[in-house]
Amino acid sequence: MSKQKKPMNEKQNESIENEDIEVVAEDDELPVVEEEVVIDPMEQKENEIAALKEELNKAKTDIARAYADTDNMKKRLQKETDMAKKYRFQSAALEFLPILDSMNLALSQVPENEEANNFVKGFEMIRTQLENALQNEGVKEIDAQDKPFDHNTMQALMQEKVDGVESGMVVEVLQKGYMLKDRILRPALVKVSE
């Protein structure tokens, strides 16, 4: 007996076409279904606490660093302020030194005139007042005459062989040198023995 296939009607045809049919070949791997990991709520809270503690420690470190930076800046600014106060007179002193040099030079050339002596006394008083004002601000003369040459406070312009004087001694001060507290304003210009 032969079986005859009945032709499919249109409705059946459509339903077969619309169905999703998945064909799996024997060689293909089947998709792996991942198991859902169950996290213990206590462990999750402990992880959150550890993360918050780490964040808190980082914030504490940042704050400590900021305080240290602020403290260092404060110290540096205080040091700069102290230095500025200590040497505030430096530029004014440098302006006064040539005036003092000129007065000393003028007073070393005093004429033998009675009328000029009154002017000389007046200029000597002015020079004394200027020297006192400079000393009050911490300006002092570098004592170089007949002292060993010191390259920190003196500048040798000439060398000369002088009998009876050992080598390296200052034999003449060509221009006075001055210090402001512990800083050199102007080195002394000197002649040194050979």
Image (cartoon, rainbow, N blue to C red):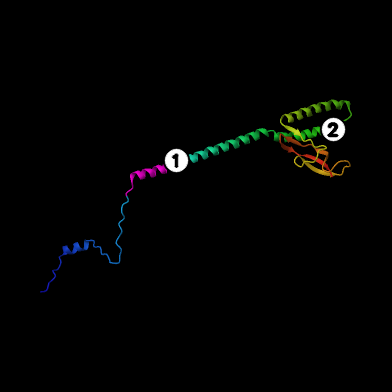
Residue 43 in the figure: left or right of residue 120 = left
Looking at the rendered structure, the number of numbered marks drawn on it comes to: 2
Seen at 62% across and 34% down, the residue is 81
Where is residue 177, by image quadrant? Answer: top right
Sequence order check, earlier mark of 1 and 2:
1
Quarter of the image with the N terminus is bottom left
Q: Is residue 141 magenta?
A: no
Residue 166 position in % (x across, y down): 85, 42
Reply above or below: 183 against 11: above
Does residue 69 appear left or right of residue 91 in this picture?
left
Residue occupied by mark 2? 108
Residue 91 location, x and y as percent?
A: 70, 35
| Farthest-out residue, left | 1
Kind of element beneath mark 2: helix
Q: Is residue 36 left or right of residue 54?
A: left
**Which quadrant holds the C terminus?**
top right
Q: Which residue, given by chain and number where applicable, does mark 1 sit on?
A: 56
The amino acid pointed to by label 2 is Ser
**Residue 104, horizontal then vertical, whole percent:** 81, 33
With respect to residue 12, does 121 lie above or below?
above
Q: Which residues are magenta?
A: 38-59
Return the x and y of residue 92 as percentages of the image width and height.
71, 34
For the residue pair 34 and 100, the one nearer the viewer reads as 34
Cα separation, mark 1 vs mark 2, equals 77 Å
> Is the residue marked by circle 1 packed among few (<14), some (14-19), or many (20+) residues within 10 Å?
few
The image's mark for residue 131 is none
